[in-house]
Image (cartoon, grey):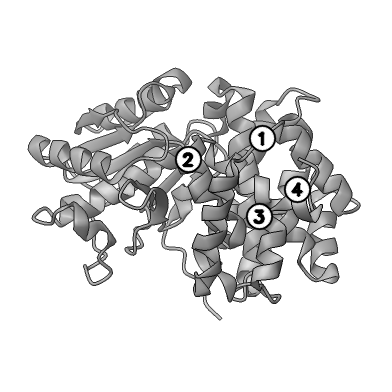
Amino acid sequence: MKFYMPVRIYEGEGCVLARREEISSFGTKALIVTGRSSARKCGALQDVTEALEKCRKTWCIFSEVEENPSTQTIMKAREYGLSEGADFVIGIGGGSPLDAAKAAAFMMFHRDCQEDRLYDASLSPEALPVIAVPTTCGTGSEVTGVSVLTRHDKKTKGSIPARIFPKLALIDGRYLKAAPLSVIASTSLDALAHLMESALQKTADDYSCMAVEKGLSIWSGIKDILTGERKASAEDYAALMRSAAFGGIAIAQTGTSIPHALSYPVTYDMGLAHGRAAAYFLPGFLSCAPEEIRSRLLSLTGFPGIEEFQAYVEKVLGEIAVPQETLERCFEMVKDNSSRMDGCVFPMDEKSLAGIVYRKKTGNMRY
């Protein structure tokens, strides 16, 4: 049994400024990696720069991270950070900026390596220190070592081999207030997929299952926000962030499973948000699980059965039509991935996989 969590996690309103001395202890100049506008709109960037200024540290900002960042973007951030003399990295945003921050810190440490070395498993996993400030409630990237990047050479997404855990995760629910419901829903579905997929991995143990149970229990209290049935309160925003962090803690121990593997071609081909793409396959995947485990997960999440869960996912997702060509690519990519196929706690063969992917033909899902 193992439990690996080197991240120091602080949660609460104003935690960035409250931890400014700790932030400043990692270097003299920060490369801030973020998207084009959301970090400014929600106030997170202001908090980070104020914290650095109060500690008389300098910074430079790379704000060109796109959704599902490419390996080319990482190299651009790396070159910018090195040219500015940055010696630690702060990621602000959702999973894309946080994953980009980790990958940029990795390549800044390996300053003489080219882009193709990002996926070289023989390369030392050392990186510059990373601090993560999440502004969405899905990926849990603030507490994982995972960095998922878009690979245009393979027309999909994939995790780099190096595991780069942030040194600090600073989680403030206030930052969610600026996010539209569509973003909150998509990212929170990603957190749900993390929690459920982790529970159904062979690598799950007592520690990861504790994170799953806590995360799902928290998530059950905010699921009506995703459907627009009620507006979120300050406590709800904190809960959304917390459920995502527990999802990250869980998959840091176990990894993700079939829905995530299937989601990558859908995101690449359609531009569908990652959380929605993973959730698209989640009910079909859950229906394959042993009844005892499935019932436990549904009970923790507040659903009496798989039909109610399916209806809920449909309501949040709306109409999604994945092209047949994309579905075929999903199937072909995953059926030959032995680590994914053999990683489930229940037998996963090509017939079961086809039932998850081609739901219109199998009747697993209505849309």
Q: Name the residue under label 2.
A: 269
Q: Which sits earlier in the primary sequence, circle 1 or circle 2?
A: 2
| Contact? badges 4 and 3 (CB < 8 Å) | no
Depth check: 330 or 117 in front? 330
Seen at 79% across and 60% down, the residue is 287
Looking at the image, is mark 1 or mark 4 earlier in the sequence? 1
Distance between mark 1 and mark 3 Cα atoms: 13 Å
Q: What residue type is labelled 1?
A: Ile
Mark 1 or 4: the one toward you: 4
Q: Residue shown at 85%/56% (left/top)?
A: 299
Which residue corresponds to the image point at 54% horizontal and 36% vertical from the top-left? 272
Position of residue 328 in the picture relative to residue 366 (left or right): left
Gap in angstroms between the C-alphas marked 2 and 4 = 20 Å
Report if the CB atoms under discs 2 and 4 are less than 8 Å apart. no
Report the residue marked by disc 1.
320
In this rendering, the answer to whether 358 lies above or below 93 is below
Name the outermost residue toward the top.
Answer: 41
Mark 2 neighbour class, 10 Å CA radius: few under 14, some 14 to 19, many 20 or more: some
Disc 1 to disc 4: CB gap under 8 Å: no
What residue sits right under mark 4 in the picture?
360
The answer to the question of whether label 2 and label 3 lie on touching residues, with beta carbons closer than 8 A, is no
Residue type at mark 3?
A: Val
* Screen quadrant of the C terminus: top right
